[in-house]
Amino acid sequence: MTNVVVLVGRLTHEPELEYTAGQGHAVVNFALAVDRDYKNREGERETDFIPVRVWRKQAELCAEYLSKGSQVSITGRLEVNSFETDEGDRRKSYKVVAENVQFLDSRKAEEPAF
């Protein structure tokens, strides 16, 4: 069986870098805005906001070089977690665990002030 997700989109907020309590592994979380390929009945493109998690060295690089609005390509897997609310309702949460993150924006050199 295969679980592969490929996304291209822009970060909706600054990456949030944390370290795990036990072994101190870096983990970064952010959401990715991904436009759908088609337009709705009103002629507008809809956007999905997808939570993404990145681990270890790649997480540290994402935290250092990405910011809100950065465009990235992500290859990873979909992770689904089930939980029960305090009211006893069953819920699921979804996120993409990135295995490869490619930065698509070029770093622009600051233009000299004249």
Image (spheres, rainbow, N blue to C red):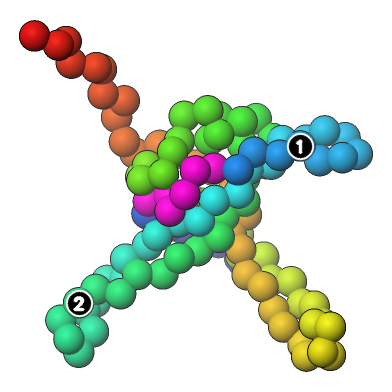
Q: What stretch is highlighted in magenta?
A: 10-15
Nearest the viewer among 3 and 31 is 31
Amino acid type of the residue tagged 2 in the rendering: Glu
Q: Residue at x 60, y 43 (%)?
A: 16
Instruction: Note whether 4 is above or below 17 in the view shown.
Output: below
Q: Is residue 112 visible?
A: yes
Instruction: Note whether 36 is above or below 89 in the view shown.
Output: above
Q: How far apart are marks 1 and 2 (CA)?
A: 40 Å
Instruction: Note whether 45 is above or below 98 in the view shown.
Output: below
Tell me residue 30's x, y (percent).
54, 51
Q: Does the magenta stretch include residue 84?
A: no
Q: Quadrant of the C terminus?
A: top left
Q: Earlier in the sequence, mark 1 or mark 2?
A: 1
Quarter location, residue 47:
bottom left
Tell me residue 72's x, y (percent).
40, 45
Tell me residue 50's x, y (percent).
50, 63
Quarter location, residue 67:
top left
Q: Is 36 left, or right, of 12 in this rendering?
A: left
Q: Is 50 left, or right, of 78 in this rendering?
A: left
Residue 44 is labelled as: 2
Q: Which residue is drawn at 67% across and 65% down?
A: 79
Q: Can residue 58 be seen in this view?
A: no
Q: Is 96 left, or right, of 67 in this rendering?
A: right
Residue under label 1, please give it.
19
